[in-house]
Amino acid sequence: MKKLILIVSVMLFLSASSAWPQAFQPNAVGVTMGHWHLNVRNIEATRKIFLAMGGAEVQGDNARVRFPGVLVILREQAPTGGTVGTVVNHVGFLVPNVQESVKRWKAAGVPVLPGGNGRTDQAFVVTPDELRIEILEDKNQKFPIQHHHVHFNVPESEIPKIQAWYAKTFGAKPGTRGQNQAADLPGANLTFSKADGPVVTTKDRALDHIGFDVNNLQAFLKKLEAAGIKLDRPYSKNPNGVGIAFIYDPWGTYIELNERPDAVYIQNSN
């Protein structure tokens, strides 16, 4: 049955439609990874990169590209800088075979850089607006490409604090990824590393903000406010009926929170 559910989920994902992209099943507090919101100088050029990497079109909307676990939203606005130097240093995807993907992407004109220290199971894509995307390998995954991580850089003394904040605020499960402290949400590993120098907010940069989808958003926001978290933008609904609000984390990550009507979820990633 689980295999059947996954097959159906993949088929639905791969079919271009106006439906909202599927996220992974929310965690116990109703949170799952939602989207990246990018500031780009050229929507069509950036969109072509993501489509060549294996993203799916959203019918009738050339500013959105879907991947399992994340929606990439493009806004035509010159960013004030790339991701490096912000609290979110980079984001990441998983593919079954990095070298096969790199070969295919390069042929399609995707700007790919090699992995560090000669690694063949790692590569980087850096967009013209300097969004840095790490590509890692999982030979056992069922999707050709899927969202994997958001990598935060903060002062070393802040690493336990940011891990604890995401665990308390969004129900992320604390753990490690390699040598880094981390916390897992459905569809995303949140990885926390030591920053080499000062970092700034994501707002107005290439990755303007990250988004989480939340069940019962209004009740969730009341809990955030009771915990002393200030809303940068209070709850409202957009014309599509999607609930929306914005907050900052204490380190400067701009975060959008959404409640999507009639959401359909991928049950798991394996």
Image: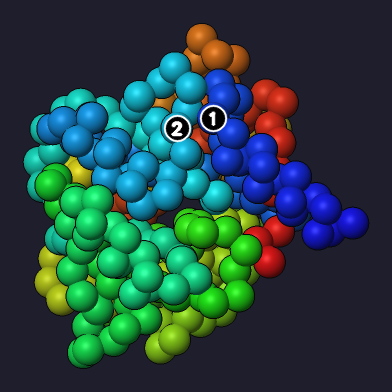
**Which element type, helix, strand or loop, lies under badge 2?**
strand
Task: Report x, y in % for residue 227.
Answer: 56, 48
**Image mark for residue 16:** 1
Quadrant hosting residue 14: top right
User: Looking at the image, which residue sits at the far top?
Assistant: 239
* Front-lying residue, 247 or 180: 180
Within-10-Å neighbours for mark 2: few <14, some 14–19, many 20+ = many
Which residue is painted at 14% across and 45% down in the image? 129
Q: Position of residue 192 (x, y in %)?
A: 38, 72
Q: Which amino acid does label 2 sit on?
A: Glu
Q: Looking at the image, which is closer to me, 109 or 203? A: 109
Tag 2–tag 1 contact (CB < 8 Å): yes
Residue at 90% x, 56% y is 1
Residue 57, labelled with which disc? 2
Q: Position of residue 108 (x, y in %)?
A: 24, 51
Considering only order in the chain, which callout, 1 or 2, is on the residue closer to the N terminus?
Answer: 1
Horizontally, is 17 left or right of 232 in the view?
right
**Left or right of 23, for residue 159:** left
Residue at horizontal 60 percent and vertical 40 percent from the top: 13
Front residue of 154/268: it is 268
Q: How crowded is mark 1: few (under 14 residues within 10 Å), some or many (20 or more)?
A: some
Q: Quadrant of the C terminus?
A: bottom right
